[in-house]
Amino acid sequence: MDTEEFWHVLDAAKDSEKPLDVSVADHLSALPPGKILAFELHFSRLRDAVYRWDVWAAASVIGGGCSDDRFSDFTAGLVALGREWYERAVACPDALAEHPAVRTAALSGDQDVIFDEDFNFVSSKAYERLTGDTDNFWEAWETHRAVRATSEDDGGENMGESFDFDDAQQMRRRLPRLAALYRGSGPGGLT
């Protein structure tokens, strides 16, 4: 499975009436186990690419704070948004302020938009359907990942410049559109 096929799986799943994670798992479970592992490898690399402080700051603004576990759900959700929005967020996390669901969530106070815990497990769910055992996926995944490890797989070592998410002035400077959308852009915003 290459990158184009990965994004095609997501695009095709979005046409379903089922939740995206269920639809993707349905599609993957019709593929051979190696394709499911290849999908997970692409998914893992895409998530690793957004494991950065600036993206974490965006998650913190949108989610009203963001723990390690919640950030994992956020990175999964970014991938689940699809290629266009994923690439926009990679280039500039502040661009998420333009996403229709983010704008609606800001008005309603929904702190779960983009955070998608279930999407973290689409590959394991699909693999379990094929084999009948969840443990089979994790064992196969460890082997698959180890064989295909590259020097690009840095495990989040290059997260960019760290900064204080509680510093309102810094957050307004780094994420002006999200700050204005969620917390106001005036001197009292981002408290």
Image (cartoon, rainbow, N blue to C red):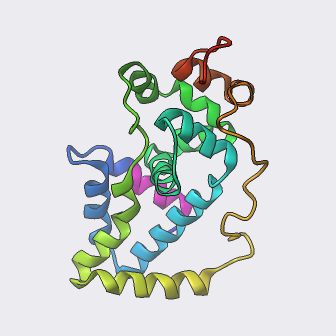
- Say which of 20 and 134 sits in front: 134
> Which percent across, then down, holds residue 103?
45, 22
- Say which of 35 and 138 sits in front: 138
> Which percent across, then down, holds residue 26?
25, 62
Note whether 141 is above or below 179 in the view shown: below
Q: How many marks?
A: 0
What residue is rendered at 55% in x and 39% in y?
A: 60
Judged left or right of residue 130, residue 153 is right
Q: Main secondary structure of the magenta part?
A: helix
Q: Which residues are magenta?
A: 2-10
What residue is rendered at 31% in x and 49% in y?
A: 20
- Say which of 163 and 5 sits in front: 163
- Say which of 181 and 122 sits in front: 181
Location of the C terminus (image quadrant): top right
Judged left or right of residue 109, residue 98 is right
What residue is rendered at 59% in x and 85% in y?
A: 146
